[in-house]
Image: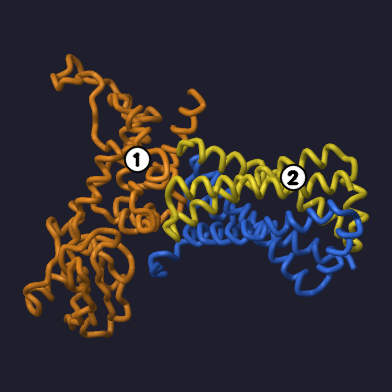
């Protein structure tokens, strides 16, 4: 698949790419997330054991990435909904979506990092 | 511009394949890319195949890929796209190549027909002349929606720019869908039910991901992406029974 | 399933997820304060029918939304098209949702 970047650098295309790639990664992560939480079925001890296992720097970083991906995907999705349902013109939405996504991501990062 | 000559790479070949050929073209003041191609064919390479007609931005025949973007070569100033004196020319993407810079537009128009992109008069199904003019207020919402898209001359720039067209062989594409939208908003047209059915689904408007490449590239500033979103809305309300 | 129907399912689940994600993220962030523990999570979800209902609906919407999205990517980037693949994606949707609902139930009944 030849993707010549010259014709694909307008903001709406970048937004599409971010939306698609973040969705792909989230969709691949989601079953893992559900399986991990399903450990709770075996009881509090199993769930606690799993949470302890994730208490490393690498995994905390991965979690932060996931929250950012989620925020980005949500922002891109709001852009698509505005374009399709509200009939907005492209130039407005990309800005709105970008700022919404950015603020969500920043907020998420900030709060995730708060606490010991 | 300081360069005296342009370094021009032109894709040459046919449906079986091809490669870039390199030419040196003297720069001029107020030079369009079409001027460059014409110079190559007249002065250097007589058998170079390319298309043009009006030369003044009305017919869309001269569309090709200039430095990675589909555009009309007669309306593209060399100084705007080749400030460093380098030009790369390819035939329009997403279409079969006949030879060199000339592509086969048949698939483009075949999809136009598949999208039911032709007017079907409500009042005279057998083609007889209607008794009266149809009264269509120009400021009505539907007429304005139709007017926003009817200037399309079928040049293929949007189709060549669309990645979904590249990734999905059945996808009808922005021009055909834009035309369907203008007709869906034409109150004189009687074929809308069949037309909306034709433009729904994986080969139709629902395959559009709003990358906006079509709207970005359209030389007539039409917004096919917006038209496609309109089709999605029409199908949505229709499915809900309105 | 028709084009408009699949599209409505995708956009509809998207809207549900938008709301659900905001609730979920805020809840997580409040829960993470002072460190995360199973006891804390389960204290919220154990025996709580409202959280069960919320997360079950959330899991269903996520399963559907993810599978429909993956279907588009696979069709466009891998050329995976046809009835067989459609059925496979339906299975993916159901399985993912089931895994999520199982997890939600686990948190409810722990």
In the figure, the shade used to draw chain B is orange
Q: Which chain is yellow?
A: C
Residue B216 visible in the shown view? no
Q: Eyeballing the image, is C88 above or below A5?
A: above
Label 1: state its secondary structure. Answer: loop
Crowd class of label 2 (few under 14; some 14 to 19; many from 20; radius 10 Å): many
| Residue of label 1 | B148
Crowd class of label 1 (few under 14; some 14 to 19; many from 20; radius 10 Å): some
Q: Which chain is blue?
A: A
Q: Quadrant of residue B71?
A: bottom left
Side (left or right) of A54 relative to A24: right
Q: Quick check: marks 2 and 1 in contact, CB under 8 Å? A: no
Give the residue at x 23% y 45%: B110
Q: Eyeballing the image, is B178 above or below A91?
A: above
| Residue of label 2 | C101
Give the residue at x 90% y 45%: C46
């Amino acid at each position: 698949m030849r993707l010549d970047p010259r014709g694909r650098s307008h903001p709406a295309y970048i937004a599409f790419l971010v939306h698609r790639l973040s969705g792909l990664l989230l969709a691949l992560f989601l079953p893992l997330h559900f399986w991990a939480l399903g450990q709770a079925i075996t009881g509090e001890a199993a769930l606690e054991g799993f949470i302890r296992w994730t208490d490393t720097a690498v995994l905390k970083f991965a979690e932060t990435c996931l929250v950012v991906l989620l925020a980005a995907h949500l922002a891109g999705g709001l852009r698509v909904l505005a374009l399709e349902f509200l009939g907005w013109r492209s130039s407005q939405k990309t800005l709105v979506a970008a700022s919404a996504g950015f603020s969500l991501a920043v907020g998420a990062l900030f709060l995730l990092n708060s606490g010991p | 511009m300081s360069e005296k000559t342009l370094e021009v790479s032109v894709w040459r070949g046919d449906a079986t394949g091809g490669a870039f050929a390199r030419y040196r073209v003297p720069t001029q003041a107020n030079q369009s890319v079409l001027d460059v191609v014409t110079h190559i064919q007249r002065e250097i390479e007589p058998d170079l195949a390319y298309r043009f007609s009006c030369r003044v931005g009305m017919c869309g025949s001269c569309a090709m890929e200039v430095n990675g973007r589909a555009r009309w070569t007669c309306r593209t100033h060399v100084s705007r796209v080749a400030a460093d004196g380098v030009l790369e020319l390819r035939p329009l993407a997403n279409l079969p190549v006949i030879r060199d810079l000339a592509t086969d537009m048949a698939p483009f128009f075949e999809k136009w027909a598949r999208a039911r992109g032709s007017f079907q008069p409500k009042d005279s199904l057998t083609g007889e002349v209607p008794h009266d003019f149809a009264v269509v207020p120009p400021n009505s919402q539907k007429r304005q929606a139709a007017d926003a898209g009817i200037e399309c001359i079928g040049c293929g720039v949007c189709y060549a720019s669309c990645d979904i067209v590249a990734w999905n062989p059945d996808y009808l594409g922005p021009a055909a869908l834009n035309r369907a939208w203008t007709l869906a908003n034409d109150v004189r047209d009687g074929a809308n039910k069949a037309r909306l059915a034709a433009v729904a689904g994986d080969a139709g408007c629902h395959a559009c991901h709003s990358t906006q490449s079509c709207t970005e590239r359209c030389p007539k500033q039409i917004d096919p992406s917006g038209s496609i979103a309109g089709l999605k809305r029409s199908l949505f309300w229709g499915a809900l029974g309105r | 399933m028709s084009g408009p129907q699949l599209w409505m399912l995708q956009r509809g689940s998207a809207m549900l997820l938008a709301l659900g994600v905001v609730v979920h993220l805020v809840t997580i962030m409040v829960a993470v304060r002072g460190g995360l523990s199973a006891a804390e999570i389960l204290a919220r979800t154990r025996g709580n029918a409202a959280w069960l209902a919320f997360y079950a609906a959330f899991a269903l919407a996520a399963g559907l939304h993810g599978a429909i999205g993956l279907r588009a990517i696979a069709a466009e980037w891998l050329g995976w098209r046809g009835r067989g693949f459609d059925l496979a994606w339906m299975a993916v949707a159901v399985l993912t949702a089931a895994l999520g609902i199982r997890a939600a139930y686990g948190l409810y009944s722990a």
